[in-house]
Amino acid sequence: MIINIDKSADKTSESIAPEKLKSGDPVTTLWHAFTDKTDQFHVGHWGSEPCEIRVSYSENELCVLTRGEVELTDIHGVKHNFAKGDAFVIPAGFEGIWKSITAVEKIYAIFEASKE
C-alpha cells in the first residue's frame, strides 16, 4: 500500500516541554502519516509558530520546509538557515536550538536506529 504524505492525517497539537522551550509559542502541530512495523521510521508533517526549542536528536531526520524560515544553531554556535523549499538532514547526535523564525511547516522523515 502506498501512503500519501499529505495533511489528511488527523491533526494533533502538542505542547513543547517547558525545559525545551527557550522562547515563543509552546504549541506544535503534527500530521503523522506513517510509521513502519519496526517503529523506527516515521513520516508526516510538523508545524509551529515562531519559537525557539532546545533540541537533542537521537534520530536522523530529513526535513523539507513547505512554509517559513528556520535557523538551527549547534552547541558550538554554528548557524544554518533554511527557508521554504529547502531540504536538509539533521543527524543523530545534533544538539542545539531549533528556531522557527516565522510560522513553519515541514515534511519530516525520521529514522531512529535500534537501541539493541
Image (cartoon, grey):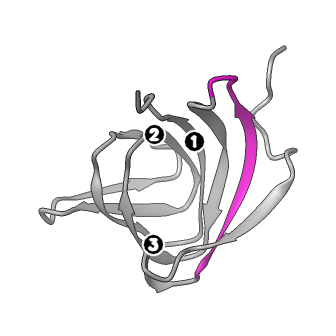
Q: Residue at x 49, y 83 (%)?
A: 18
3D distance between C-alphas at marks 1 and 3: 18 Å
Q: CA distance from mark 2 to mark 1?
A: 7 Å
Residue at x 52% of width, y 72% of height: 102
Identified by mark 3, the residue type is Ile
Q: Position of residue 57 (x, y in %)?
A: 37, 50
Residue pointed to by mark 2: 61
Where residue 76 sits, quadrant-wise, is bottom left
* Mark 2 residue type: Glu
Please, what secondary structure does the residue beneath circle 2 have?
strand
Say what amino acid the circle numbered 1 marks: Tyr
**Which of 90/14 is in front?**
14
**Which quadrant would the N terminus be assigned to in this image?**
top right
Mark 3 lies on residue: 101
Whether tag 2 and tag 1 are in contact, CB under 8 A, the answer is yes
Q: Is residue 11 above or below residue 45?
A: below
Q: Which residues are magenta?
A: 26-38
Q: Residues within 10 Å of mark 1 (few under 14, many from 20)?
A: many
Residue position for label 1? 108
Q: Residue at x 28, y 46 (%)?
A: 93
Tell me residue 21's x, y (percent): 46, 79
